[in-house]
Image (tube, rainbow, N blue to C red):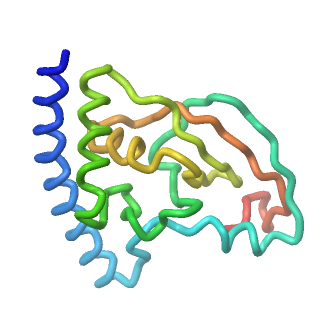
Amino acid sequence: MEGNYRLALVEGKEQFNQERFQAAWEETIARLRGRPRGLAPYLPVVQRLPWHTEHERGIREVPLRSIVGSVNRAHQFTAQMRPRSDFLRERWSRVYAAALASQGLPPIELYQYGDAYYVRDGHHRCSVARALGAREMQAYVTELIGPTAEGGRALR
């Protein structure tokens, strides 16, 4: 088991390098197109709400493409959840190795507002899941209920 983890850790470091390379390309393209380069920050969304309530929705399968933001690490990952800094290498590689060795990742924690999700806990797990080709991930979801914009969609 230990040998499998060590091998997966080496693979994780190689995969991290590929993800960082892709992140650099994503950021360049986003900059040229005038689009945001990182995840959307959660705090400005909540601050714009005149009121809201929170409801625990339990564990759900959440499409990774619906995760658009972060509570506290928006600057550390691209909009596609790729790591933006080499500072994240060791932790990211360990999570990758654990995912391969144990055949899965524990659920992450998300806030949901409308059809958008914001990572509260589990940024590295989410990033690794995307790198491994997952389309969905289990998450503990807390839904924010507040005023909606015209047409019934949540404000963003």
| Residue 127, percent from left and from top | 36, 48
Point out the residue furthest to the front here: 2
Q: Is residue 48 above or below residue 5?
A: below
| Residue 58, percent from left and from top | 70, 30
Residue shown at 11% from the left, 47% from the top: 14
Q: Quadrant of the C terminus?
A: bottom right
Q: Is residue 61 left or right of residue 90?
A: right
Q: Is residue 75 left or right of residue 11?
A: right
Q: Is residue 12 above or below residue 30?
A: above
Q: Is residue 126 above or below residue 134?
A: below
| Residue 51, percent from left and from top | 89, 65
Q: Nearer the viewer, residue 71 or 45?
A: 71
Residue 128 position by quadrant: top left
Q: Is residue 42 above or below residue 59?
A: below
Q: Is residue 106 left or right of residue 133?
A: right
Residue shown at 52% from the left, 49% from the top: 66
Q: Nearer the viewer, residue 94 or 153?
A: 94
Residue shown at 25% from the left, 22% from the top: 101
Q: Quadrant of the N terminus?
A: top left
| Residue 55, percent from left and from top | 81, 42
Q: Is residue 72 left or right of residue 43?
A: left
Residue shown at 43% from the left, 70% from the top: 75
* Count of residue discs: 0
